[in-house]
Image: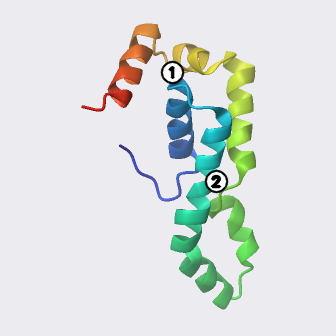
Amino acid sequence: MFHCTTGKDRTGWAAAALLLLLGVSETDVEYDYELTTATCCRPALTPVFEHFRSAGGDPHLLEPVLGVAPEYLQASMDEMSQRFGSIEGYFTDGLGIDVAGQRTLQEALTDLR
């Protein structure tokens, strides 16, 4: 298990990549990613946005930094596909985790004992 404040950048990509490696569809990964903002991030960060507004700032300026947008994940998946061809290629060539290591990850993450 791992944690991040908003889960949209490095941690969001790590979670998405692991889910894709496990065979979860891109559509389901995208849906889960978008839930992050609706159920977790936005409500938790509302005080930050409101404080920024009360100090005279435009809360929309915070959106790219603190918000979550489907385009962020899609850009990551597009880049991964373009550079590595597949999620397995990303793990092999991008992360240096060979097929045996990928299987070990898959087994460890799906072992429901």
Q: Amino acid at mark 1?
A: Leu
Give the answer, above or below, for where 25 lies relative to 104.
below
Task: Please say if 79 is above or below 96.
Answer: below
* Residue located at (41% from left, 22% from top): 106
Q: Residue at x 68, y 68 (%)?
A: 62
List x then y, in percent, for residue 107.
36, 21
User: Colour scheme in the image?
Assistant: rainbow
Picture residue at 65% right of the left edge, 18% below the top: 86
**Which quarter of the figure has residue 28?**
top right
Query: Is 69 positioned to the left or the right of 102 in the image?
Result: right
Mark 2 residue element:
helix
Q: Amino acid at mark 2?
A: Glu
Q: Which residue is mark 2?
A: 34
Q: How many marks?
A: 2
Q: Which residue is mark 1?
A: 95
- Of 81 and 20, which appears nearest the observer? 20
Q: Residues within 10 Å of mark 1 (few under 14, many from 20)?
A: few
Q: Position of residue 96 (x, y in %)?
A: 48, 15
Question: What residue is shown at x 53% (from left), y 19% (from top)?
Answer: 91
Label 2 to label 1: alpha-carbon separation: 25 Å
